[in-house]
Image: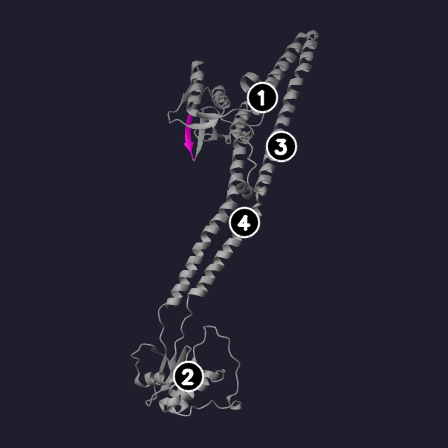
Amino acid sequence: MKLSRRAAESPLFVRIFLLMLVCVGVVQLLNFALLALVQPPTPRAYLVGDIAKVLQEGRDPTGELEFTERVPTDPAILAPRADRLRPALAMVLGVPTSRVEFGFVTPPFPQRAPSYDRSKLPPPIIPGSVSRARGFLVLDDFVASYQRPDGSWVTVRPAGHAFELWRWLALLSLIGTAAAVVPFAWGLAHRLAKPISAFAEAAERLGRDPRAEPLALSGPPELAEAASAFNQMQARLNRYVDDRATMIGAIAHDLRTPLMRLELRMENAPEKIRRACEADIRDMESMLAATLAFVRDTTRPQGRRPLDLRSLAENVTDDMTDLGNDVTLDPGEAIVLDGNPAALKAMISNLVGNAVKYAGSAQLSLAREDGQAVIEVRDSGPGIAPEDVDRVFEPFFRSEPSRNRDTGGIGLGLASVRAVARAHGGDATVENRPEGGLLARATLPA
């Protein structure tokens, strides 16, 4: 138990570093096993006598040599071994060296050897006898050419072979090394990606519910510090929002007192002025009451639980219909999500209430699209001006030109709708319908 706790508390840097060291150690052990177990390739050896016989007969029964096109050699390139073997091959063939060419195959992009003047070098050693010349050994990949009596040239070189055993063993060793590295690479990637995924989930959860539970301070020290910083950021954001809302609520609450004093002082004013001022005071009191309710609903911690959104919509439409309003709900399947029932019901009521107030009817529909619940309320009213589409969600904004509270409202209904939708991780929009009327849409994570 203590050992596992120490491992969990060890720094992430140390754990990754040790994992990489183990990976390198495993690879080195496999390379050492390759060197110890795989035998080096045996070089292919050819005798000058055998090469001469194949050139004279024009065939090789053993299949060790193959005939190819003539490859002229450059006499200006320093090649001491070829200079020694060429006279030996000519002696075995019984022809002058001018009718024999001998060289070694070079890489595709060889480093050119320094040129030299053959006249300044001692002549190559001539074998003392033909039998001795036949025994000269050739180990490398060579090219030998011989000019026949009819003037044609014949050229041979070692035949290409399939994969030798040592090549197969080396290939299997490389595949085994790669297979051994894969678990370490997967473990390293998992260790690096897991904290990032955890923070991404926490950020998504914070966007859906600012009052979500803080991250657990567990794991390596780096992750614990990052989780602590994230929790502090979440707490600061909530305090900032709460302080702003509290300030607005306090201002709205404290304005009631001077309004009440103003109303008392208006008792002695002339009748015409008093009635106009009393109407303005009532409007201000209604706006203050709506502001206090808005602040209270948007800042109060809301408990969430799984609920059926369609059931809430049915309750809203039933209540509206009982009041004599023309409200319909399109049929569909149940949509279950986590949310606050009271807040979501108030959001749907605001959307439907706005449609009924301004258009006289509302058509409500629910659907599930791309993992989200979509609430749409359509009406057949006059719609709104295009320049006001983005402003209707601003607090106290009223697209209705009248300042009458009965026809234009307070201007907090749609602001409350967007606040509830965003508090649940969604959003709210409105748009004019091509056939006329307005379409209000709210999306919620389902």
Range drawn in magenta: 365-369
Q: Which residue position is annotated with label 1?
A: 296
Report, in whole angstroms, how far the alpha carbon at label 3 lies from the one at label 2.
85 Å
**Kind of residue at badge 4:** Ile
Q: Is residue 251 above or below residue 214?
A: above
**Most prominent secondary structure in the magenta stretch?**
strand
The quarter of the rendered structure image containing the C terminus is top left
Q: Which residue position is annotated with label 4?
A: 16
**Kind of residue at badge 3:** Arg
Q: Which residue position is annotated with label 2?
A: 102
Q: Is residue 64 above or below residue 315?
A: below
Q: Which residue position is annotated with label 3?
A: 236
The answer to whether any part of residue 70 appears in the image is no
Q: Residues within 10 Å of mark 3 (few under 14, many from 20)?
A: few
Give percent across and percent down for residue 392: 55, 27
Q: Are marks 4 and 2 in contact (CB under 8 Å)?
A: no
Of tags 1 and 2, the one toward the viewer is 2
